[in-house]
Amino acid sequence: MKSTPATPERGFITADAPSEDDLYKCVQCGFCLNACPTYLETGLEAESPRGRLTLMKAVNEGRVEMTPTVTRHWDLCLQCRACEVACPSGVPYGRIMMATRAEMKTPVKRPMRERFARNMGFNRLLPKPKLMRTFGKMTRFYQRSGARTLTKKIGVLKVLPDRYEYLDQSLPPMGKDFFVADGRVLKPQGQIKARVSLLGGCVMSMMHAETMQATLRVLVHNGFEVHLPSDQGCCGSLNMYAGERATARQMAANNVTALLSMNPDAVVSSSAGCGSTMKEYGELLDGDERAEELANKTRDIHELLADYGFKTPTGRLDARVVFQDPCHLLSTQRVSDPPRQILRSIPGVQVVEMAESTVCCGSAGTYSITQRDMSTRLGDRKARNIIATGANYMATGNPGCALQLGNALTRAGSEIEVRYAVDILDEVYRAGGDYA
Ligand code: SF4
Ligand code: SF4
């Protein structure tokens, strides 16, 4: 989507500013309010979609300056897009907020420390898969060598600002092995249903490599020829949502070339956040034909299995399982039944539903670090709803949600296991000897 050209009179001044067509679609009806997690938690209009849009219009018209007092209301938005689903007027809130975040980069002076961290993370680290893996290995060494235990013992983190202690606590345990897309092609036995390119991603490949391996086994078992193009990288989701659009575009362009290189029938992601971003590459790259092709071919793993069909497992799992809808699966990709269909196919599994299933868990990319109070409140809220189902397992399809809710359930003293739906399917296939 091309933004409306900026004019000097507008409060929004960059080429990435939200378009006026989008901004003025809101008719102020308020149907979105009770869908919004930050409104539910605060009850404040300024922390609602309608309030945030009103502020954007005021800035756009030059009635209000884009000061940090204004932008903190936009920073508190999770970009979960539950409001977009609830809106009867079709306000493209996600697109508007992404454009606003890009705009916020320029006039708003963020503190030096924050600008440094953003530049290092978004522009130096994330676009470079090899550097990311080096960073991941250093983190893994810190966590597994005893250095972390020693740091805690001698109290180093206590004398640093509390943000460092929280960052340390937020570091997810790095996997023993990383998943590397190394150019392999895995062929199924028998007839091939479809040829697919698989995105490794950054978080998934370093923290949940075993889920990526499970994804490979499930795909091959179900008749997919899987390509792992080696030139692919991070999907750019974190950059796109943080308003770092220049690097997000570079990362998207790189993935378009890499993931379409074998002319696959579909491009698959086992992370809802990555899949949702790839489905928006066409828009991010201003309608580029190849980017549109990749967007149209992208399928979330559950969606792909449901579309092409998958084998019912021979084994069984006697358990109550609740599926937690990642916002980037439910509200952005509008996929809700396929993961439940997969879980229901497992003999012995009883799929149960939680209250407030559409309310974000508070993970939202880097939100759990930048807005930790609201993130924790929403994580605890979601954990209460999960516990109330009496489930043995909580299944998900997104790494951020898995990490956030693993922590929230532990805080709540719950023993509910957090798993990916594809991990559960893979385990039951293995237990039943289906891979033999
Ligand atoms: S994207 Fe989510 S947090 Fe942001 S305004 Fe909409 S519902 Fe609220
Ligand atoms: S539901 Fe849509 S039109 Fe109504 S206030 Fe919310 S964003 Fe505006």
Image (cartoon, rainbow, N blue to C red):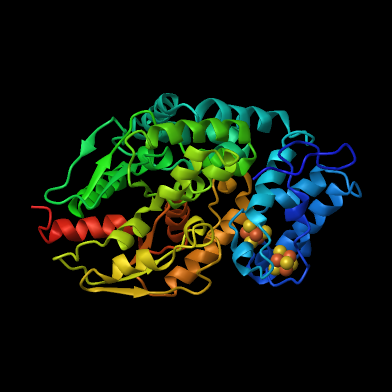
Task: Pick the residue in front: 82 or 290.
Answer: 290
Q: Is residue 72 above or below residue 347?
A: above
Where does the image place residue 403, in percent across and percent down from the top left? Answer: 44, 50
Is residue 58 visible in this depiction of the protein?
Answer: yes
Task: Pick the residue in front: 90 or 218.
Answer: 90
Q: Residue at x 46, y 40 (%)?
A: 171
Where does the image place residue 198, in percent across and percent down from the top left? Answer: 33, 42
Ligand 1 - quadrant of the structure image: bottom right
Q: Residue at x 37, y 59 (%)?
A: 303
Where does the image place residue 52, in percent across and percent down from the top left? Answer: 75, 56
Q: Quadrant of residue 309?
A: bottom left
> Quadrant location of the N terminus?
top right
Q: Residue at x 52, y 43 (%)?
A: 281
Q: Is residue 268 above or below residue 155?
A: below
Where does the image place residue 85, in percent across and percent down from the top left? Answer: 59, 66
Q: Quadrant of residue 417?
A: bottom left
